[in-house]
Each structure stands twice: as structure tokens, then as C-alpha cells.
Image: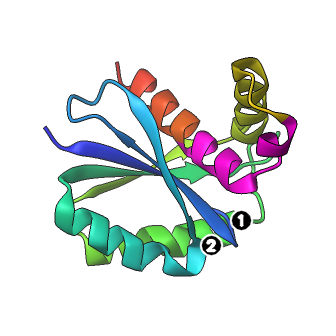
């Protein structure tokens, strides 16, 4: 079975998570510089069988799109054009940064490591992916 890859897009850094081949467990993969994202994805897709790309859908508390949405929609269009064999879907990403910080606190990660925004982005991508997979069950 193909993997599911989740993207927590940021204007500077983008967190990436991927499922296991059975699509049961989400795992943080990497944080990449956003300007290198599509090259990184091309390299990864050449090595791994990914069938679905989940993009975190940024929204405000009232459900309206947040400021970052203006970058996400064009990214989705480019991904669909570059990899038409992959399903590109959106999944609500509200509260993922808060949940990522909470997970870091509860896991006992030190104060300095919790300031690592790249780690927060990777954990946020993992939360988006796990939430997406749970919603599909």
C-alpha cells in the first residue's frame, strides 16, 4: 500500500510527516526550507511510494481561511500538476502548533529543544497526518 505524506506549510519552514506503508502510524519525517520543498518532494517521491498528500489547511477560529491559505492553494495546484497520480487533500490544521508544544512538554523534551521551531513544524505535520488518518477510519 502507498504511504500518506502530510505537509505543515510555513512561509520559511515546512514540516513533513509520513505514514507507515499500512497507513496506521504517522511519523515525523523532516523539516525543510519552504523554498526547497518541491525539490525535496520530487526526490522523496522518486524513492518512496506515496499515494496521498495531505496539506494542512490553515483556518482562523471562525473557520475562515488564515493568511497562509494564499500560499497553500497555489501549492496544491502545483502538486496536482506535477504529480497527477497522487491525491492531494486538505485537512484542518487548527491547534496543531498548540498540540505540538503540549506533546513536547508531556514527553519531557527540554526547554531548549522546545524552542526548536523546526521540531514543532515536524510534530505539527505528524499531528495533521494522524488526525487525517483517524478521520478516515
Labels 1 & 2 near each other (Cβ < 8 A): yes
Q: Residues within 10 Å of mark 1 (few under 14, many from 20)?
A: some
Name above or below for residue 123 compared with residue 24.
below
- Looking at the picture, how far across and down is residue 2, in whole percent? 18, 43
Asked if residue 45 lies left or right of residue 28, the reply is left
Name the residue: 29% across, 64% down.
44
Is residue 21 found left or right of 72 in the rendered image?
Answer: left
**Residue 71, which numbered label?**
2
Q: Quadrant of residue 23?
A: top left
Viewer-proximal residue, 87 or 64?
87
- Numbered label attached to residue 68: 1
Query: Whole-percent x and y of residue 97?
Result: 74, 41
Up/down of 56 relative to 75, above or below: above
Q: Is residue 29 left or right of residue 92?
A: left
Q: Residue at x 32, y 44 (%)?
A: 4
Magenta-colored stretch includes residue 118: yes
Q: 10 Å neighbourhood of mark 2: few (<14), some, or many (≥20)? A: few
Q: Is residue 78 magenta?
A: no
What segment carries the magenta color? 111-125
Above-or-below relation of 35 to 134? below
Quadrant into which the N terminus falls = top left
Q: Position of residue 88 (x, y in %)?
A: 36, 56
Helix, strand, or loop for circle 1? loop
How far apart are the alpha carbons under marks 1 and 2? 6 Å
Q: Main secondary structure of the magenta part?
A: helix
Residue 107 position, x and y percent, is 69, 21
Is 101 displayed left or right of 69 in the figure? right
Please report the residue visible at 22 percent of the width from the left and 50 percent of the height from the top.
51
Amino acid at each position: 500500500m502507498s504511504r500518506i505524506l502530510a505537509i505543515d506549510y510555513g512561509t520559511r519552514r515546512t514540516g513533513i510527516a509520513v505514514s507507515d506503508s499500512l497507513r496506521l502510524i504517522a511519523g515525523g519525517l523532516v523539516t525543510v526550507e519552504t523554498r526547497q520543498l518541491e525539490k525535496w518532494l520530487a526526490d522523496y517521491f522518486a524513492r518512496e511510494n506515496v499515494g496521498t498528500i495531505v496539506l494542512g489547511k490553515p483556518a482562523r477560529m471562525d473557520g475562515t481561511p488564515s493568511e497562509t491559505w494564499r500560499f497553500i492553494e497555489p501549492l496544491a495546484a502545483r502538486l496536482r500538476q506535477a504529480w497527477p497520480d497522487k491525491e492531494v487533500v486538505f485537512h484542518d490544521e487548527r491547534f496543531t502548533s498548540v498540540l505540538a508544544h503540549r506533546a513536547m512538554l508531556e514527553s519531557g523534551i527540554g526547554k531548549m529543544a522546545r524552542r526548536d521551531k523546526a521540531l514543532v513544524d515536524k510534530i505539527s505535520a505528524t499531528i495533521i497526518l494522524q488526525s487525517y488518518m483517524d478521520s478516515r477510519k
